Image: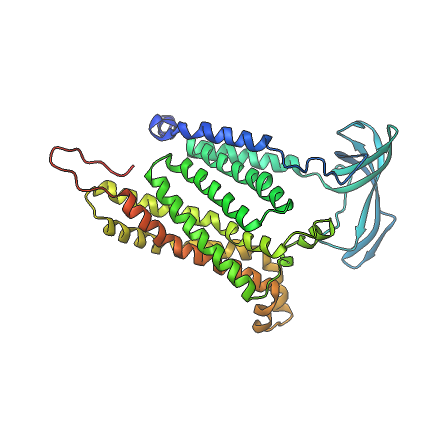
Amino acid sequence: MRKTILNLFRKLWGPQTASWRVLAPGIALTVLLLLLPTGFEGALIYQDAEKVRATVLEVDNGAIINNGILQSGEQYCTLRIEQGSFAGQVAGGVNLLGGSLEQDKMFTPGDSALVVVSHAGGQITAVTMIDHYRIHWEIFLAVIFGLLLVLFAGPGGLRALLSFAITVLSIWKIMVPATLKGADPIWVGLLLVALLTVVIIVFVYGFDRRSLSAVLGSMLGTLTACVLGVAFTGVLHIHGAVMQDSESLLYAGYQNLNLTRIFMASIFIGAAGAMIDLSVDITSGICEVVRKKPGIRPWEAVGSGVRIGQAAMGTMTTTLLLAYSGGYMAQLMVFMAQGTPLVNIFNYKYVASELLQTLVGCFGLVTVAPFTALAAGFLLTRPAPRPGQSEGGAG
């Protein structure tokens, strides 16, 4: 058993599978994105206040009004501040309840809470309770996930973690601030997806013709989804305000934002990951076909890629459907419980927007398969080797 485990680690971490040369640029890009300023570092909601963690010592529920399953009023808590300038001090905090199961939270002694400590002249003036403090458990889950990924996938797991970090940082450090500053979200989104597509696929293949094939196939599918999303958002008369919390941007002083174009960008950005996945699958399949049969003709390789895509598209489109619709289970239950006719359901704006995202994303996936098959079929095939030449596969 011990020998088997050691052999597995050698296989995962051996030089033949490591591809360490792409890790250094990935790490450098991650650090660069971390250090990249957004321009909104000084946009603080809370002035003369600190947002810190506190421990709930006691609670007083005497001012809470119970209305069936809903509660309103105020919950008074005795807190010990754990962070910031007032760490170690005990203060009273107020938890405001507005009668909303979605927004309200209840605290019990021993809970960790995220609070805003308002102060003046070095003294605490008020403590407002924001929510339960969850960051430590989120970090715990992320660390465990990262360790397991690296343990079982070796350097591939490291590349996957870097891809994840670069994707999150790119959206937060590039897409979000650029859009807030007035840049067109569609063009910013296309550039962002192009950057992420190149980075993620290079992490998989390195710098070679396979990468070029997969990037071309994925980006052509993304462009297709972009065009369809822009066209049918107008046809279906969908306004960008269907996105959750989007109207809050307008009330926060960003009336110049075009919410509808932001919604259009979200359509192809949301489907880009599945398109990258499918393009890599098809490229890898064609690459293996060419490796086993170096003299295969380009159109034969294209045909093999199309057949590989046919097998993968069914599951990929279902994956995309589940990804978009999974968060709307409660709404579907409400529709059924109220006996809402299907014709009404499909005409609701927020339902139509989800259908548009799903169908356009699936349409993009359908086009990724032939685009990638064409690119890989012609880029990865080579003429049959002449006598005396060694046979080589695509690389």
Residue positioned 57% across, 49% down in the render? 185
Question: 22 or 222, which lies in front?
Answer: 222
Q: Residue furthest left?
A: 387
Res. 318 visible in picture: no
* 237 w.r.t. 324: above or below: below
Whole-percent x, y for residue 192 in the image: 51, 43
Question: 52 or 348, which lies in front?
Answer: 348
Q: Quadrant of residue 114?
A: top right
Question: 183 or 311, which lies in front?
Answer: 183
Residue positioned 24% across, 38% down in the render? 393
Residue positioned 12% across, 33% down in the render? 388
Whole-percent x, y for residue 7 in the image: 35, 27
Image quadrant for the N terminus? top left
Residue positioned 61% across, 35% down in the render? 139
Task: Describe residue 83's horizontal placement relative to residue 156 as left or right.
Answer: right
Task: Describe residue 98's horizontal placement relative to residue 363 as left or right.
Answer: right
Whole-percent x, y for residue 50 in the image: 77, 34
Q: Quadrant of residue 134?
A: top right
Task: Describe residue 65's horizontal placement relative to residue 140 as left or right.
Answer: right
Task: Describe residue 151's horizontal placement relative to residue 53 as left or right.
Answer: left
